[in-house]
Image (cartoon, grey):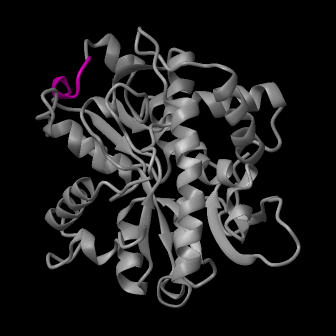
């Protein structure tokens, strides 16, 4: 399971030879969105590049980027947020590859309405002319996706009150307990509400946004002094991304994701890292069921990143002279 104490980290098991390997410290969360990394580690792609990834799991993406900023990790995988952008800007770590993203036709984060609001006839965001919409935190991906929803054909809604719950779980609790009418939630929290009839689906965020959820970051030292090692790490990571894409993102004629031997074998690997304490069959189902879309080459969507940064600037959260090129390094083969 995910760790609960934000400052506590637990080492992840990773098979690697005892000698002749470049050690690379990696900060990460136990999330299926980091599946490319886990597949690459389990299938020996890092070993083939002469790298020993020393992975540590943190309780949140915020703790991951703080560890990177503090110099405690060479590589990190974390969601985009105003915090990750500002820390990258201030300390010099940069995004070198993509994590998961939203893609039309694939499930991802979700816009959910409470059961009470649904009973009042609320089916879309632009119907919520008053009431409360909740997201996890200022400048988070979920906050950004709400903005994308407002700009979509179903948007225009500005009459509601926006509140920040502090975490996705707390945002889901606000819907469950009747303290909010609508929320943008990760698929896990959204499904829990839908399964218990405490919320109704408004839309997948992928229907109005192609937002990139996160990135793989490299430390200033890796970029300046160990660039060749970073390139090897990226080669292995991209192999994992290609495997992730091939295993999980095939659609059938009804546009439903296909579950087959390849996806289940890959899901077992994700389950090992993401849900180490769960029962094997439950962990497997959860791991396979919550995967997002991922680019097969782990390419960064700089257009979306610039759009996100422009939104941060419009909110007064970021200096207007800043752009995506300040925190991205695409100069790797």
Residue 232's image quarter? bottom right
Quadrant of image for the C terminus: bottom left
In the rendered view, tell whether residue 289 sits above or below residue 21. above
Residue that protrudes farthest toward the right in the picture: 18
Quadrant of image for the N terminus: top right
Q: Which residue is at the front of the view, 271 or 140?
A: 271
> Residue 293's x, y, as percent?
44, 37
> Residue 318's x, y, as percent?
23, 73
Going 48% across and 85% down the picture, which residue do you hit? 220
Going 27% across and 59% down the picture, which residue do you hit? 302
Going 28% across and 77% down the picture, which residue do you hit? 326
Instruction: Using residue 243 as the reference point, say whether residue 165 is left or right of it.
Output: left
In reply to whether residue 214 is colored magenta, the answer given is no
Going 75% across and 35% down the picture, which residue do you hit? 268
Instruction: Using residue 264 as the reference point, say whether residue 81 is left or right of it.
Output: left
Q: How many numbered badges does the structure rendering display?
A: 0
In the rendered view, tell whether residue 205 sits above or below residue 65. above
Residue 204 visible to the viewer: yes
- Which region of the structure is painted magenta? 123-128
> Residue 81's x, y, as percent?
38, 61
Q: Which residue is at the front of the view, 323 or 269?
A: 269
């Amino acid at each position: 399971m995910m760790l609960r104490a934000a400052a506590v980290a637990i080492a992840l098991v990773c098979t690697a030879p005892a000698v002749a390997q470049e050690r690379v410290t990696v900060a990460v969360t136990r999330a299926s969105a980091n599946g490319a990394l886990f597949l690459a580690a389990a299938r020996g792609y890092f070993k083939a590049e002469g790298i020993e990834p020393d992975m540590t799991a943190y309780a949140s993406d915020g703790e991951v980027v703080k560890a990177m900023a503090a110099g405690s990790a060479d590589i990190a995988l974390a969601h985009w947020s105003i915090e990750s952008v500002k820390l990258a800007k201030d300390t010099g770590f940069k995004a070198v590859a993509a994590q998961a993203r939203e893609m039309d036709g694939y499930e991802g984060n979700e816009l959910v309405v409470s059961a009470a609001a649904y009973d009042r006839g609320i089916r879309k965001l632009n119907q919520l002319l008053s009431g409360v919409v909740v997201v996890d935190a200022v400048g988070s991906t979920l906050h950004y996706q709400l903005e994308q929803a407002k700009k979509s054909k179903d948007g225009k809604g500005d009459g509601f009150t926006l509140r920040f719950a502090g975490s996705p779980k707390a945002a889901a609790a606000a819907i469950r307990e009747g303290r909010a009418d609508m929320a943008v939630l990760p698929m896990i929290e959204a499904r829990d509400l839908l399964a218990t009839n405490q919320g109704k689906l408004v839309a997948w965020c992928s229907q109005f946004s192609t937002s990139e959820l996160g990135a793989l970051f490299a430390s200033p030292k890796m970029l300046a002094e160990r660039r060749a090692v970073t390139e090897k790490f990226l080669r292995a990571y991209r192999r994992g991304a290609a495997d992730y894409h091939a295993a999980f993102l095939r659609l059938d004629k009804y546009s439903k994701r296909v579950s087959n031997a390849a996806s289940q074998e890959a899901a077992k690997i994700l389950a090992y890292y993401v849900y180490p304490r769960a029962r094997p069959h439950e962990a497997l189902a959860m791991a396979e069921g919550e995967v997002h879309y991922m680019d097969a080459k782990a390419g960064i969507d700089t257009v979306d990143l610039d759009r996100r940064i422009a939104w941060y600037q419009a909110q007064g959260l970021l200096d207007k002279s800043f752009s995506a090129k300040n925190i991205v390094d695409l100069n790797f083969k």
